[in-house]
Amino acid sequence: MRHLALLFALLVLPACESGLEEPASLTDKQVGTTLNEAVSEAEQANDWPAAAEYYHSLFERSPNDEKIALRYAKALRYSGYGPEAAGVLMPFADKHADNVGLRIELGKCLIAATQPAKAVEILKKAQLQAPKNWEILSALGIAYDYQDMHSEAQESYLKALDLTPENPVVLNNLALSQAKSGALPIAIATLERAAKQPRARMQIRQNLAVLMAFKGDAQAAERLARQDLPADMAGRNASMFRLFSAPSN
């Protein structure tokens, strides 16, 4: 049997390493300004490892600033450092219990740190504070999916869609949950809805390509891959799609 867990693997493009020297002639205020400018540029370039480095420096200067802590944790999570991200935010959870955004990010970091049950606990608290926040419901769905609680996950995604109809992020998560629970045709239809949305990200189309390959349509999968990926990468993915589409022995 082919493993649909492959759907949750991320294709990560390497980012350039980046550092920031602090000349002795700069004042502390100037250094802070320079760091903020550097982290803004890194975020705009989606260079999250570099952004995490800069936020680390800012966090060392202001270790009690929950806003910097939140952004630092997010950069770490985007860079693949889930446990470290959760470790940054955990000390702030009780001290800033009224900060819903911090609790949402902590929940996401705990999911990335493979602590989905703990994430559900944190996100449920956030939901009490902001019951109409679709992002909380979507994150809860992911936490449930990580625990193979697909019915609960899909219920959470559907509630999120009631608040933000046709949101491509939520539709994507719902489709992957449907695929993991064995409803591949329904998952494809859901992901096709997501891919049609103006705000659909490249990853959504690539997830749809993988689902089409599992369905047995390698040609459709390859067409989707070539919409966004460089020719050499699309070619490598095409070989993988043909393997997925091959009949099982």
Image: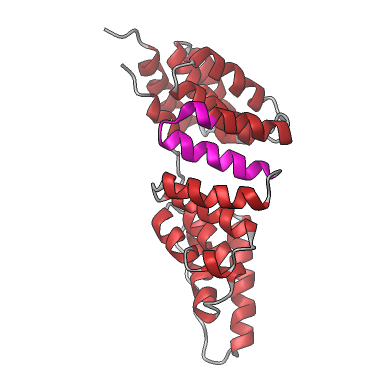
* Residue that sits furthest to the front in the current view: 128
Quarter that holds the C terminus: top left
* Magenta-tinted stretch: 133-153
Residue 143 position within the rendered picture, expressed as x and y whole percent measured from the top left: 48, 40
* Residue that sits furthest to the left in the current view: 249
Residue 103 position within the rendered picture, expressed as x and y whole percent measured from the top left: 57, 56
- At a point 64% along the width and 63% down the height, the residue shown is 98
Residue 172 position within the rendered picture, expressed as x and y whole percent measured from the top left: 58, 30
- At a point 61% along the width and 40% down the height, the residue shown is 137
Vertical placement of residue 66 versus 1, above or below: below
Vertical placement of residue 176 versus 66, above or below: above
Toward which corner of the image does residue 163 lie, by quadrant? top right
Q: Main secondary structure of the magenta part?
A: helix
- At a point 63% along the width and 86% down the height, the residue shown is 29
In the rendered image, is residue 50 in sight?
yes
| Color style of the picture | secondary structure
| Closer-to-camera residue (167/57) | 167
Toward which corner of the image does residue 198 lie, by quadrant? top right
